[in-house]
Amino acid sequence: MTQTTPTPGSQAPAAAQGTAYHAILTVQTSRGRILTTAEVLILRPDQTRSSVLMALCDKVRDQHGGGFVVLFFALTADRLEVGR
């Protein structure tokens, strides 16, 4: 999977602005292979957790074929709460 990371201090075009989230997806293929991917995604306010999961599953399906099950999925804001 592709990893998208925002460049610190850069301004994204208005259409691409959003909030950075870190997504992790682990799947097991029908042949027993375990695949994990991690990405930083820039998400719009109207996107949902389930739409992100479906998009990541579509990427896995495109790259590795159909049969797999999701073992783990995490989606959290890509920022550290320093000093809290």
Image (cartoon, helix red, strand yellow):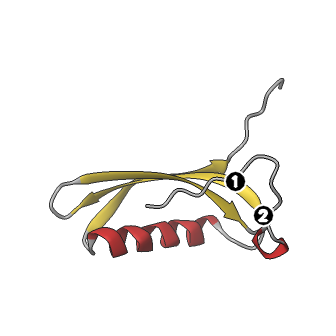
Q: What residue did someone put label 2 on?
A: 18
Please tell me which residue lies in front, 79 or 14.
14
Q: Quadrant of the C terminus?
A: top right
Position in image of residue 46 (x %, y %)? 75, 73
Residue 6's disc number: 1
Question: Where's residue 29, x and y in %?
Answer: 24, 61
Q: Is residue 81 above or below residue 54?
A: above
Q: Residue at x 81, y 70 (%)?
A: 13
In the rendered view of the protein, which quadrant contains the N terminus? Answer: bottom left
- Toward the viewer: 36 or 68? 36
| Mark 2 nearby-residue class (10 Å; few <14, some 14–19, many ≥20) | some
Indicate the quadrant where residue 81 lies.
top right
Chain-order first, disc 1 or disc 2:
1
Which residue sits furthest left? 31
**Nearest to the observer: residue 33 or residue 71:** 33
Q: Residue type at mark 1?
A: Pro
- Residue 25: percent from left, percent from top: 44, 54
What residue occupies the far top of the structure in this picture? 83
* Front disc: 1 or 2: 1
Residue 44's disc is none
